Amino acid sequence: MKKLSIGSIQKRKGTFPLVMITAYDALFARLFSESADILLVGDSLNMSFGGNNDTLSATMEQMIYHTQAVCKGAPETFVITDMPFGTYTEKATALSNALRIYRETPADAIKIEGGADKAYLVKHLVDNGFAVCGHIGLLPQAVRAEGGYKVKGKSEEEALSLIADAQAIQQAGAFILVIEGVKADVAARVAQSVSIPVIGIGAGNGVDGQVLVFSDMLGLYEPFVPKFVKQYMNGAVSVKEATKTYANEVQNRSFPDENYVY
Ligand code: KIV
């Protein structure tokens, strides 16, 4: 599949849903690239791959390393890289860290979390030549500040605030927006309130595309399965069964048999 341009991504607004999946390495990126429009090197890698409880300790070095791997595995797929927590606290920091991502990886765009309060940062990055993906609603990087992962859009006040967030991020120049953990009817209103594509995660079907964390989508991550996650395979079961069979065959010396020797 040929890499989508920002223009062709934006033309998908309100038409054919965009498919986004997280990817953290070349192996899976290559497999996903056959079906995904966009790969997201999400800082969620700090949880499923890093074994941490949240995304907050992800570093620039990790994001750069994983983005390089993803881009090598899927050179023809549009790649967005998450800017980790604490790397865009003000304009100068945001710019120097975004520059590192563009200089040290071929990522096509960067993503930062936050609504209207972060619009000035989005604008600064866009003004300096970056393609920026916004991220509103439930913000994983705010988990400690908010004391948990809280679904948003439960009141009319929250709905209006999300619409204001989306419009501010669009106004600041973001070309696409992720909306996470928002009541489906509110997410649909948000999507209708802007002209950029809105990609949902735990935000229902009234948006312009979907993103899932790949280890959730493949049923590989067992510690916690959010309600919105559909597991498209029993990855954890398959991996454990295969490993057990391998272990048994090593232990009873049935592997390697004559088919697997030089
Ligand atoms: O880090 C990530 O994987 C993300 C998705 C949850 C959208 O930001």
Image (cartoon, rainbow, N blue to C red):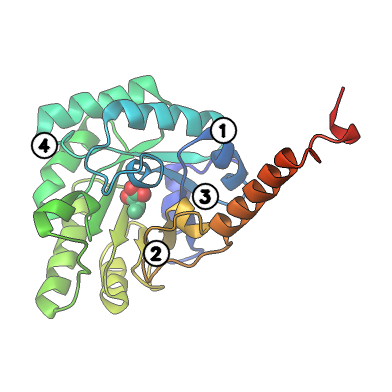
Q: Residue 89 carries which label?
A: 4
Q: In which quarter of the image is the N terminus?
A: top right
Disc 3 residue crowd, few under 14, some 14–19, many 20+, Cα 10 Å: many
Residue sticking out furthest to the front: 252
Q: Is residue 117 left or right of residue 32?
A: left
Q: How far apart are marks 4 and 2 (CA)?
A: 31 Å
Q: N-terminal of the two: label 4 or label 2?
A: 4
Q: Which mark is residue 37?
A: 3
Q: In this view, does 153 lie to the left or right of 184?
A: left
Q: Is mark 4 within 8 Å of ligand 1?
A: no
Q: Which mark is residue 99?
A: none
Q: Can you tell which of label 4 and label 3 is closer to the viewer?
A: 4
Q: What residue type is labelled 4?
A: Thr
Disc 4 residue crowd, few under 14, some 14–19, many 20+, Cα 10 Å: few
Residue ID for mark 1: 73
Q: Distance between the residues labelled 2 and 1?
A: 27 Å
Q: How far apart are marks 3 and 2 (CA)?
A: 24 Å
Q: Which mark is residue 225?
A: 2
Q: Distance between the residues labelled 3 and 1?
A: 14 Å
Q: Distance between the residues labelled 4 and 1?
A: 31 Å
Q: N-terminal of the two: label 4 or label 1?
A: 1
Q: Does the residue labelled 2 lie within 8 Å of ligand 1?
A: no
Q: Does the residue labelled 1 lie within 8 Å of ligand 1?
A: no
Q: Which amino acid does label 3 sit on?
A: Asp
Write down the quadrant of residue 173 in the picture. top left
Q: What residue type is labelled 2?
A: Val
Secondary element under disc 4, as helix, strand or loop, is: loop
